[in-house]
């Protein structure tokens, strides 16, 4: 028997309409790429989203299911795209601006973006690959400065696109399972893979992350969104803030520690998100130049890489600012767990509490997790037994975009994260290692396999194995071990860097190169990364 409750689709339109009704005066503040500050209300945001949606339909001929790319910083126009595009049933595909040209080209062609909204400061990155983009019909330029010119064909300026459009709309009836957004995630081998979010998953994720055991946000908060909108929908914060009525502050490209601190001070921000390298940078800058007045910042939510107990401890001790660790993936929308202390932990020592807070935490309602050992058995929740972390839930991927590859999925319907972890008796998960052959540097992925293939294509390199080495600022950096074909023809670090720069973005190129006589192998002849890490990851033999 069905329940007798209305069928009310959970769509992004309902979020926008809710904010218009409940929080029309709350603010969206943007520090734009040209350094100017822009502010308007959620009421104005809603009206401009309607204008944008009308323009998409009337001027660009966008219809349901069309893929629309965004290549932009965090700012109000990008938030408008987060609502205007899915509002009419099209899909907001946020493209990571930090990838190599080769990967960007692949992603745009693979997703079949029809239109791309691009920040003027980022246009040069697209100009390089534009002739190879097969499906893009138009580029909409955001934040174009006076005298802006481009070699891109078929461009319109964002304001021109929406200025003559009605600021009301009858949003179409959408199914909550319709696709709403898309992000690509780095593949260990081959090219990135697309993760297609639905309206329902986006809505449920946003509702969950605002809750007390997660981010704990309300209309009292002023939140700085440091996580880029081109990274897993800025962790869903642009949707969540409209549900809570929190003011939203957007930094665009002002991501250096000094700039972040200036924005924190100016906007009296009390909560923020970001990867650990950002918060490490902010902490160090605050130590160097302590603020004259105590910051309003109370709490920062960290994910993407491990938040260390020492950073949590020092930030809190020196500045009274609390770090909360969360874990997630592009495939999990992204947030799946957070590590907050519970009532039962109150009487523990500070050290014991820090140990818990440095774990990745308990799962949110709507997410299930388990650890599966090499023997295929579910590991006991003893905080010791390690295995692969597997998850399922209402905002977890069930299949990648346009591929039937099931390597990441178990037969009984779980997603294999590629993270190695334990779960303790209290249900706190802790990441201990990673099975995927990737390096995460400052929140961005680097594929060891791609670097190895490129290095081994060098005429004087027989074998190359790339591993992550710990790095205080970036969490990890790549180190390449190479075996020369002819030992009498050594290759300098500079040469190797130049050689790799053809195919890789700057941050992806290893800082360290070690020439070895042979790469250690496993019994089946694969590169033994564990052994290589043991030998080199301590940095002892870095060159
Ligand atoms: P991405 O899909 O780029 O968001 O990356 C997801 C991956 O980042 C996870 O599978 C983990 O390997 C890593 N990750 C995310 N959050 C954390 C965290 N809090 N601690 C350690 N690793 C993390």
Image (spheres, rainbow, N blue to C red):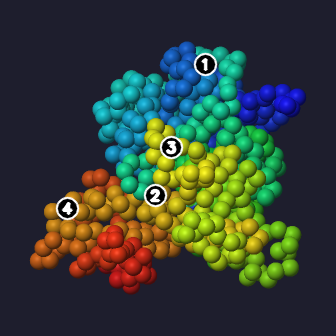
Q: What residue is disc 3 on?
A: 400
Which element is circle 2 on? Answer: strand
Front position among marks 3 and 2: 3
Mark drawn on residue 458 = 4
- The residue under the point 26% across, 72% down is 482
Q: What residue is disc 2 on?
A: 445
Q: Label 3 CB, ligand 1: below 8 Å?
A: no
Q: Is residue 496 visible?
A: yes
In the image: residue 308, left or right of residue 267: left
Which image quarter: residue 499? bottom left
Front position among marks 3 and 4: 3
Q: Residue furthest bottom?
A: 540
Q: Earlier in the sequence, mark 3 or mark 1?
A: 1
Q: What residue is disc 1 on?
A: 54
Q: Quadrant of the N terminus?
A: top right
Q: Earlier in the sequence, mark 3 or mark 4?
A: 3
- The residue under the point 50% across, 31% down is 68
């Amino acid at each position: 028997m069905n329940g007798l409750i209305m069928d009310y689709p959970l769509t992004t339109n309902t979020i926008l309409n809710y904010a218009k009704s409940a929080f029309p005066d709350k603010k969206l503040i943007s520090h734009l790429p040209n350094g100017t500050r822009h502010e308007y209300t959620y009421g104005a945001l809603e009206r401009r989203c309607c204008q944008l949606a009308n323009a998409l339909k009337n001027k660009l001929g966008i219809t349901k299911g069309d893929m629309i790319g965004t290549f932009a910083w965090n700012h109000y126009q990008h938030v408008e795209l987060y609502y205007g595009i899915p509002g009419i049933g099209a899909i907001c595909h946020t493209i990571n601006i930090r990838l190599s040209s080769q990967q960007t080209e692949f992603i745009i062609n693979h997703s079949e973006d029809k239109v791309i909204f691009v920040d003027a400061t980022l246009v040069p990155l697209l100009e390089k690959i534009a002739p190879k983009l097969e499906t893009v019909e138009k580029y909409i330029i955001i934040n174009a400065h006076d005298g802006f010119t481009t070699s891109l064909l078929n461009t319109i300026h964002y304001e021109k696109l929406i200025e003559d459009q009605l600021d009301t709309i009858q949003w179409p009836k959408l199914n909550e399972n319709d696709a709403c957004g898309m992000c690509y995630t780095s593949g260990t081998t081959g090219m990135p893979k697309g993760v297609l979010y639905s309206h329902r998953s986006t809505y449920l994720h946003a509702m969950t992350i605002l809750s007390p055991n997660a981010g704990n946000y309300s209309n009292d908060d002023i939140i700085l969104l440091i996580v880029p909108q081109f990274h897993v929908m800025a962790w869903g914060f642009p949707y969540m803030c409209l549900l809570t009525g929190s003011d939203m502050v957007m930094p665009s490209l002002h991501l250096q520690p000094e700039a972040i601190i200036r924005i924190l001070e100016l906007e009296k921000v009390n909560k923020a998100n970001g990867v650990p390298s950002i918060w490490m940078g902010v902490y160090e800058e605050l130590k160097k130049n302590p603020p004259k007045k105590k910051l309003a910042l109370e709490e920062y939510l960290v994910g993407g890489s491990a938040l260390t107990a020492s950073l949590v401890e020092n930030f809190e001790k020196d500045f009274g600012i609390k770090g909360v660790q969360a874990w997630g993936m592009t495939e999990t929308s992204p947030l799946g767990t957070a590590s907050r202390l519970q009532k039962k932990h109150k009487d523990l020592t500070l050290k014991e509490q820090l140990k818990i807070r440095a774990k990745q935490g308990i799962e949110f309602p709507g997410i299930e997790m388990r650890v599966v050992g090499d023997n295929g058995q579910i590991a006991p929740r003893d905080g010791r037994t390690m295995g692969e972390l597997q998850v399922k839930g209402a905002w977890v991927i069930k299949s990648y975009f346009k591929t039937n590859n099931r390597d990441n999925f178990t037969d009984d319907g779980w997603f294999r994260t590629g993270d190695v972890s334990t779960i303790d008796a209290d249900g706190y998960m802790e990441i201990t290692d990673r099975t995927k052959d990737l390096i995460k540097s400052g929140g961005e992925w680097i594929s060891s396999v791609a670097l190895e293939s490129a290095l081994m294509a060098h005429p004087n390199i027989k074998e190359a194995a790339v591993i992550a080495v710990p790095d205080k600022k970036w969490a990890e950096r790549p180190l390449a071990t190479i075996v020369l074909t002819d030992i009498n023809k050594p290759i300098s670090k500079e040469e190797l860097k130049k050689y790799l720069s053809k195919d890789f973005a700057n941050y992806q190129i290893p800082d360290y190169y070690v020439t070895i006589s042979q790469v250690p192998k496993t019994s089946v002849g694969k590169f033994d990364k564990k052994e290589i890490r043991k030998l080199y990851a301590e940095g002892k033999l870095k060159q």
